[in-house]
Amino acid sequence: MAVGTDSHGLVGEIGLPIEDQAFHVEQRGVDLIPLSERWARARDVGAMWAGASVQIEYFIYGAILMTFGFSFAQALSLIVIGNISYFVLGLCSLQGPQTGTTVFGINRASYGPNGSRVIAFFNWITQVGFEVEGLILIVGAALVLQIKAGSAPSTTSKVLFVVLAVAIQGVLPFLGHATILKTLRVLVVPFLVLFAVLVGFAVPHAALGAVKHGADWQTYMEGLAFTITLAGLGWAECGNDYTRYCPPETSRKAIVGWVFLGTAVPEILIMTLGAVIGTFLPAVGKASNAFLPFAHQSYIPSWFVVVFLTFAIVQLFAINSLDIYSSGVTLQALGVHVKRYVAVLIDCAIGFAITLYAVFGPSFATYLKDFVDVVIVWIAPWTAIYLVDWVMRGLRYVPRELQRTGPGGLYYRNGGVFWPAIIAQLAGMYASISALAATFSLPRWLNEITYATRDSSGYGADFSVFLGPAVAALFYVLLGWRAVRAQAARQDELLAPVPVP
């Protein structure tokens, strides 16, 4: 077998079988993807994200936005501005082709292999939370279908649906990357048709002027943080998990363009449709089961509700596969020595327990808002540090060194921790919390900016998604510039092309 090292620092292994095939169990995890297995194109990644975006969750998000008290015009502006954040996902997808590994394999460079484990843990918790969100919606849709079939939901049926949902949801992520990509692509067209039909039912009943004055600027800022986090920012930590199968020479402009086209454009349209539904069916954004209002309304025909929710269940399983897949490779990056597909089984077990609790808990909107607050606190500062580090290194890393997690590795640092990144992360997290309009109570000393921007009703503004990244980036540049630039010079030496005999 011929083996060579190119200018990207990648080991090219000629003649190896392609491991990432649809409907076969993928063996790759956080390890380096050889050049011979880099089959994906930028448009393949865009198609995968389109399959993840033309979906029911964003429809529900749009309906929930209307429960903040916004006018339709305010909600529409939030949807458009919030989804521009998908450029962040595009930027956080550019490192995979050059490094051939996952996000939290790359993250070892900025935080150190051991320091990165802390951030990987935050991401693992986040992915499990999104998995639970999908499972809650799957169970909710199944319960509405049970009502439509003439049977009243019970505690037994809820538990049974949770068990079945968890058992089924593990199949796609168990098989892996190529299977997920292919399945999501197939689901795009059916849902485009279903949403187009739903538009036809919704438009005659839309009450776009029902809320004339809308919410104040403080609430608007909370809605913006909510939308940005559930759009591009909330997916940023997954981007390179799916671009690592692209060759190193893949155009960066193409990746950002295809990712944005496959995400922001459909989500703006689908969230807008959800907001339209929210103007005449507000219970969608408030009910403990977001789909329950569809069981007892006269606006949309029952036959369509049944078809729509049946397809929604299938698609939610596919969407959840993205979260479980990224969660699995993150668990590996965390240092848990298991195969990627074993990590999937671990996630399913944990997801089952949390979903069982959540299904019998408060409204879906309450769960989602609280969860978004938790995600903002860590992911907003992390995104800034991740991208600033990449820029400071000249937009590249040494792939083989990212796989060396012990002493002697280029990125090992002091005890495997790069303290400027850890300090910047903590500073950014404190800044995010201080400007977070949380749905749970925070003491004033921890939430000073929100307290300082309170309106007459005592409600403060939310600047968390802006202040956290700004503070984290500033701290990282000030504390880490010299050390990172010195390491970047060493990277250049290691990345110099080595001729193949």
Image (spheres, rainbow, N blue to C red):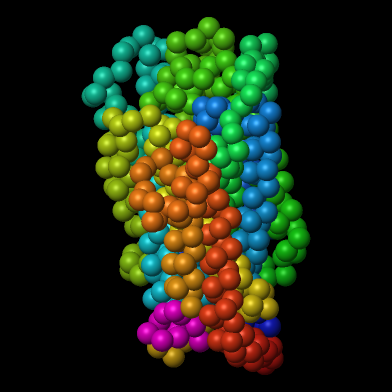
How far from the left and from the top, in percent, is residue 121? 38, 62
Q: Residue furthest front?
A: 456
Question: How many numbered dots are placed on residues in this image?
Answer: 0
Give percent across and percent down for residue 30. Answer: 47, 67
Query: Quick one: 439 or 234, which is closer to the camera?
Result: 439
Q: In this image, 265 relative to 142: left or right?
A: right
Could you tell whether 137 is left or right of 85 in the image? left
On screen, residue 4 versus residue 125, left or right, reads: right
Left or right of residue 294: residue 494: right
Position in image of residue 35 (x %, y %): 62, 72
- Look at 38% across and 14% down and name the residue there: 147
Which residue occupies 45% across, 73% down?
A: 423
Magenta stretch: dominant SS? loop
Query: Quick one: quadrant of the C terminus?
Result: bottom right
Residue drawn at point x = 53 percent, y = 67 percent: 472
Name the image quarter holding residue 245.
bottom right
Magenta includes 420?
no
Point out the residue furthest to the left here.
Answer: 156
Look at the image and say whether residue 417 sits in the magenta stretch. yes
Q: Residue at x 37, y 42 (%)?
A: 440
Q: Is residue 326 visible?
A: no
Position of residue 10 relative to residue 88, above or below, is below
Please tell me which residue lies in front, 300 or 99: 300
Q: Which residues are magenta?
A: 410-419
Q: Nearer the viewer, residue 237 or 197?
A: 237
| Residue 161 visible in the picture | yes
Residue 467, given in percent of the width and then of the height, sits at 56, 58
Camera-nearest residue between 302 and 480: 480
Against 216, residue 323 (above or below) is below
Q: Is residue 132 above or below residue 433?
A: above
